[in-house]
């Protein structure tokens, strides 16, 4: 798969991570070249919500329907209990950070400990943002709206993802993704009614051509149009039915009960010794 095609798939996926902020999503021009350039320039500015803006209305509806269908097959109490566990776990990670980092189960060396400690707050804040979004309760999640979610939550999520990237020694965003984006130039090869061929030139001079087509007043890669229906059908086929969920609900309910008991003990621990004893007992349970 050529560099641009890889980039297209990465950018589509990145709509789940961010947007331009609470003021709304970026706008896209009404031509193919302008759309491609807007996508690139907005991503350089940490505004991947441009991808949502560039999607045809029916594609947005498909994604919203997929998200809502996935949530609604889960019972309300199971969803709320699962989210509650995540909230409690994140609370423990924040309040008892020093206890966790000293746990022998983690087996962290000094250098690893320093890096994990630096990333810790950014990661727990990232979960706070996620849990305070539409996904934080069953009632809002079952009516999920990708555009609203991106506009209200995405900017904070993206900011923390970039922060987490910067805290790693590799910093893939700054050292790989961002330079590649900035280096791309777009050239229009030909254009006709509803169809435009663009050439993307990378920093190494490599040229890749991509055909864009107009769908519902939006310009998207022709490959995306061809693959979209199958992609959505395959995704929906993975959503379990109500009858499929019954056995899983029983197992999940047992796991939630066990996890909640452990988290309650960790939450109640007032000293490092008490905290580590709970973790140690978990290790013994796994061994058994």
Image (tube, helix red, strand yellow):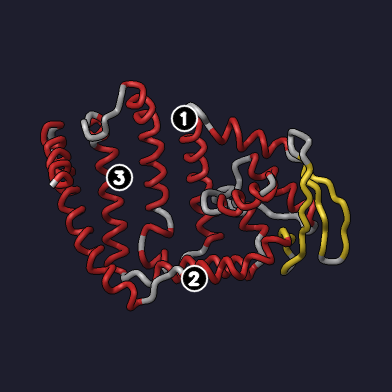
Labels 3, 1: front one: 1
- Camera-side residue: 221 or 83? 221
Tell me, for residue 282, which label it has, or none: none
Q: Nearer the viewer, residue 154 or 174?
A: 174
Answer above or below: position of 146 versus 19: below
Please name the residue shown 37% across and 57% down the image.
Answer: 136
Alpha carbon distance from label 3 to label 1: 21 Å
Who comes first in sequence, dot 1 or dot 2? 1
Tell me: 122 left or right of 55: left
Q: Is residue 68 above or below residue 131?
A: below
Under circle 2, the secondary element is helix
Q: Residue at x 26, y 30 (%)?
A: 107
Q: Are marks 1 and 2 in contact (CB under 8 Å)?
A: no
| Mark 3 or mark 1: whose residue is earlier in sequence | 3
- Is disc 2 surrounded by few (<14), some (14 to 19) or many (20+) residues within 10 Å? some
Q: Residues within 10 Å of mark 3 (few under 14, many from 20)?
A: some
Badge number at residue 90 = 3
Residue 255 in percent (x, y) is at: 22, 58
* Cα distance in 3D space between marks 1 and 2: 36 Å
Residue identified by numbered label 2: 236
Dot 3: element: helix
Q: Give the image location of residue 232, x and y in percent.
A: 56, 68
Marks 3/2: CA–CA distance: 30 Å
> Where, by quadrant of the figure, is residue 244 drawn?
bottom left
Lower position in the chain sequence, tag 3 or tag 2: 3
Q: Secondary structure at mark 1?
A: loop
Q: Position of residue 155 (x, y in %)?
A: 53, 46
Residue at mark 1:
168
The one nearer the camera, 254 or 263, is 254
């Amino acid at each position: 798969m050529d560099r641009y095609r890889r980039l297209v798939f990465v950018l589509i996926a990145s709509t789940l991570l961010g947007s331009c902020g609470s003021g709304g999503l970026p706008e896209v021009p009404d031509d193919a070249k302008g759309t491609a350039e807007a996508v690139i320039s907005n991503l350089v500015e940490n505004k991947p919500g441009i991808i949502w803006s560039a999607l045809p209305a029916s594609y947005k509806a498909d994604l919203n329907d997929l998200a809502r269908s996935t949530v609604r097959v889960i019972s309300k109490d199971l969803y709320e209990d699962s989210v509650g566990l995540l909230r409690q776990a994140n609370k423990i990670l924040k309040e008892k950070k020093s206890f966790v980092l000293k746990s022998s189960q983690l087996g962290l060396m000094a250098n690893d400990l320093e890096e994990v400690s630096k990333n810790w707050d950014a990661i727990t804040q990232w979960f706070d943002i996620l849990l305070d979004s539409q996904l934080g309760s069953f009632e809002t999640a079952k009516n999920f709206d990708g555009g609203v979610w991106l506009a209200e939550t995405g900017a904070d999520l993206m900011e923390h993802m970039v922060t987490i990237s910067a805290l790693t020694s590799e910093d893939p965003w700054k050292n790989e993704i961002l330079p590649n984006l900035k280096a791309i130039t777009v050239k229009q090869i030909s254009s006709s009614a509803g169809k435009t061929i663009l050439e993307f030139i990378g920093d190494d001079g490599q040229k890749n051509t991509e055909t864009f087509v107009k769908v519902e007043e939006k310009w998207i890669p022709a490959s995306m149009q061809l693959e979209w229906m199958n992609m959505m059908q395959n995704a929906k086929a993975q959503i379990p039915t109500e009858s499929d969920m019954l056995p899983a609900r029983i197992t999940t309910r047992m796991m939630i009960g066990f996890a909640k008991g452990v988290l309650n003990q960790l939450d109640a621990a007032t000293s490092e010794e008490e905290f580590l004893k709970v973790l140690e007992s978990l290790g013994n349970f796994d061994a058994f």
